[in-house]
């Protein structure tokens, strides 16, 4: 992990739309993403007013189609929706690798080879990238469209509305949102997951895979490990605060985890 430089954008709104649909970690699982968005559109058909799609990051790595997932995220939202895409730690790992390959070699260990393959650069089986990461990055960079990199570099870390915060990993307990470090927002686990959080504010997050959506006081984890188990999860939040889970199921990827960071 390398430290963040300038703080990324953080989105804050003073009111909630009629419905927010938050989607957990996609990790290259394009088929489930398309199926889940179709479910969301059908579910929202009877809901009047503004509707948002909020994706919680980790679009790349591990699954079969990271490049296509990014292209879809960059494209128009479904009719009647507004799309917000947040950054995950795997997007930052990709950017860090291209910036300093030897220092960010973990990206390839943690699923980045699937992203490289989706852009047309496949490992030859020799794992030469371990000893020549600069060469691997030099060959990968021209294969990634500039528009994709620009999009990744400008992703916000979180989206706040009254009563809810949407973020990839979580927050450091006891610190105001404005003072949170970007590194924590996309990487934190134990200090956040083990904390006693206030009950009057709910953090919707991914990053830590769970078998089923995890509802505990102050937070909801909707990363159901799509690349491991084949299930992609969304959480619907209505303007009155009521909640509903939607899921799309498909085949898990053939990714074998070295480390699930």
Image (tube, rainbow, N blue to C red):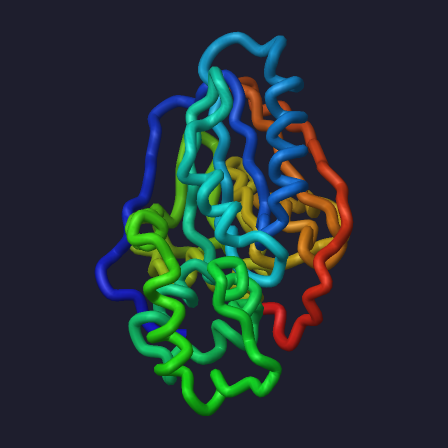
Of 170 and 156, nearer the camera is 156
**Is the residue 204 above or below the residue 122 in the image?**
above
**Where does residue 200 sit, x and y in percent of width and height?**
52, 36
Quarter of the image with the N terminus in it: bottom left
**Where does residue 204 sit, x and y in percent of width and height?**
55, 42
Asked whether residue 105 is in view, the answer is: yes
The answer to whether residue 260 is left or right of residue 210 is: left
- Point 72% across, 63% down: residue: 254
- Point 69% across, 32% down: residue: 245
| Residue at far bottom of view | 131
**Where does residue 176 sit, x and y in percent of width and height?**
35, 50
- Point 66% across, 19% down: residue: 43
The answer to whether residue 87 is left or right of residue 58 is: left
Number of marks in the image?
0
- Point 60% across, 30% down: residue: 37
Of 66 and 168, nearer the camera is 66
Of 83 and 115, nearer the camera is 115
Of 225 and 181, nearer the camera is 225
Quarter of the image with the C terminus in it: bottom right
Asked whether residue 221 is in view, the answer is: no
**Is the residue 247 above or below the residue 139 in the image?**
above
| Residue at far left of view | 6
In which image quadrant can residue 160 be found?
top left
**Where does residue 136 sit, x and y in percent of width and height?**
41, 78
């Amino acid at each position: 992990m390398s430290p963040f430089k300038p703080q990324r954008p953080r989105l804050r709104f003073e009111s909630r739309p009629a419905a927010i649909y938050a989607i957990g970690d996609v990790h290259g699982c394009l088929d489930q993403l398309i199926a889940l968005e179709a479910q969301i559109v059908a579910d929202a058909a009877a809901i009047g007013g503004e509707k948002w799609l909020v994706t919680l990051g980790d679009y790349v790595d591990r699954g079969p189609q990271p490049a296509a997932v990014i292209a879809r995220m960059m494209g128009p939202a479904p009719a009647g929706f507004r799309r917000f895409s947040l950054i995950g730690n795997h997007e930052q790992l990709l950017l860090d690798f291209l910036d300093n390959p030897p220092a960010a070699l973990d990206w390839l260990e943690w699923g980045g080879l699937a992203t490289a393959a989706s852009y047309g650069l496949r490992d030859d089986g020799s794992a030469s990238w371990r000893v020549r990461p600069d060469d691997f990055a030099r060959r990968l960079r021209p294969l990634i469209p500039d528009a994709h990199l620009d999009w990744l570099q400008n992703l916000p870390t979180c989206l706040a509305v009254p009563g809810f915060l949407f973020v990839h990993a979580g927050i450091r307990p006891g610190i105001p949102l404005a003072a949170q470090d970007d590194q924590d927002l996309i990487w934190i686990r134990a200090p956040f997951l083990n904390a006693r959080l206030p009950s009057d504010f709910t953090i919707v997050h991914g990053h830590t895979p769970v078998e089923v959506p995890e509802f505990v006081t102050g937070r909801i984890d909707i990363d159901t490990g799509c690349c491991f188990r084949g299930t992609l999860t969304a959480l619907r939040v209505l303007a009155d605060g009521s909640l509903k889970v939607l899921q799309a199921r498909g085949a898990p990827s053939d990714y074998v985890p070295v480390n699930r960071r």
